[in-house]
Amino acid sequence: MGFETLREKLQSRQGAHFDVGLVERAYEFAAAAHAGQIRKSGEAFMTHPLAVAARLAEWRSDAPTIAAALLHDVAEDTPYTKKDIEKEFGSEVAFLVGALTKLKRIRYADSPARGTAERTENLRRMVLAFAEDIRVVLIKLFDRLSNLETIRFLDPASQARIARETLEIYAPLSNRLGMGELRGQLEDLAFPIAHPVEWTALQELVAEPLEDRRRYVERLIPEVQNLLTSEGLAPRDIHARAKHWYSLWRKLERLGGNLGEVYDLVAVRIITGSVESCYAALGAIHGRWPPLPGRIKDYIALPKSNGYRSLHTTVVGAEGKVTEFQIRTAEMHEEAENGIAAHWAYSEEAADAARKRGVRALARTRDLAWIRQLREWHENFQDAGEFLESLKLDFFRDRIFVFTPKGEVIDLPEGATPVDFAYHIHSDIGDQATGAKVNGKMVALDTPLANGDIVEILTQKNKKPSRQWLEFVKTSIARGHIRAALKR
Ligand code: MN
């Protein structure tokens, strides 16, 4: 893409609140600095910062953010320094570029041989950079999305590192910001690289049921439309929503691989004009199809911690098929997809005022408790271990991270056991496991692991896995290998 595309996206914003000139000068500067540089994909280097800037423009970010996006690789990859950028564009843009340059030098998941202490320290430094200004996170997230789109041109080791970092850091971050759509995109690009075997298995498992479900929901939508219209409700939109691949895989892991229990493989989404009509639509749906007990979730009255609001219900729908409905207003929908950035889209002036009061105020308007928490962390945590622990509790709630004796981090679902851990290291280690030590103490093989545990697996040659293991393992990797070994 060229600069014209970006300029078009900014046309409507020229005015007192938006300095298009700043963006134009940043483009000229970056284009000259990167002149002649080629990406591994064969494209001119500037296509990358332009893509990042264009996405931020679509999200109606402010001019310094878009300028910083254009300049974000200058201090790292060209002879120019942060000082040059400060002289040319002032301290705000230079600060953003400087934070992004710092982030680029921190390699969270570089090499398994690196120690836990170093990894923890790197993660801590990343979070500090994020916590300084929410705009640093936004630029970094779109930088990562752009890099993932051309990741196939990198060497396998870099691909693996980037994919893993995405799943462990950037996707949870976008989720915490309420940016559900971006999170889905990041995860689905990283998933086939980080877990190729599981990805292929999932495609095979789901391809047919997914197609069935799509067709079913397409048949159902006109019926829902008629029902709501006959009740005097005029929905803004009704559409089918297929679950993202990575989140589907994680859900299947939690459910022990039972696809029949995934009721939202393709959900029906109803967008209404008001909160009242959300509840009225819910009532109409329940009047027509019986709801499953215990599956009605009112995230409007009780929003999720990342601000997500919606009504969810699961009903025995037409043709006896169990179906999930998600009901929300247009505003809630915008927020669920775009999170914190949705507020810039709503009111440029309100956002501008919020920025003048500082990013802190913006965070407060969204009531994103974790952003405040992030800010307070670096003041309150001297101890790196304690810091990592509390970070993991909040960020990675559904996952646990445990360590090999060499300090490699293994990412497992909550409730995973030493047997899951063993199979994640290698299928032979799983098959031949006879016992486990957690933090130096012998434990039973079905003991649930906890965040930060150091796990050592004891093995014996020619040993076979036990059928009983199938009753407690939590990962599809372990389950698959155990079944295969038992068959042999
Ligand atoms: Mn970049």
Image: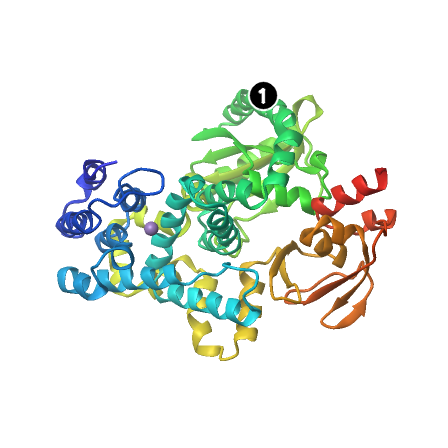
Left/right of residue 181 with respect to residue 488 in the rendered view:
left
Identify the residue under disc 1: 215
Location of residue 485 by image quarter: top right
Residue 473 in view = no
Residue nearest the viewer, comparing 382 with 198: 198
Residue 279 in view = yes
Give me the residue at 35% from left, 64% from top: 102
Against 50, residue 340 (above or below) is below
Against 483, residue 126 (above or below) is below
The amino acid on which the numbered mark 1 sits, given as a three-letter code, is Arg
Left/right of residue 451 with respect to residue 142 in the rendered view:
right
Q: Position of residue 93 (x, y in %)?
A: 22, 60
Against 459, residue 245 (above or below) is above
Q: Residue furthest bottom?
A: 382
Label 1 beta carbon within 8 A of ligand 1: no
Give me the residue at 69% from left, 32% from top: 290
Q: Quadrant of the N terminus?
A: top left
Q: Position of residue 189 (x, y in %)?
A: 48, 41
Q: Secondary structure at mark 1?
A: helix
Q: Quadrant of the C terminus?
A: top right
Q: Position of residue 120 (x, y in %)?
A: 52, 69
Give me the residue at 36% from left, 60% from top: 134
Against 458, residue 248 (above or below) is above
Left/right of residue 114 with respect to residue 22 in the rendered view:
right
Residue nearest the viewer, comparing 82 with 4: 82
Q: How is the image coloured?
A: rainbow
Tally of marks: 1
Location of residue 217 by image quarter: top right
Other residues around mark 1 within 10 Å, as few (<14) / some (14–19) / many (≥20): few
Q: Position of residue 303 (x, y in %)?
A: 52, 53
Residue nearest the viewer, comparing 27 with 278: 27
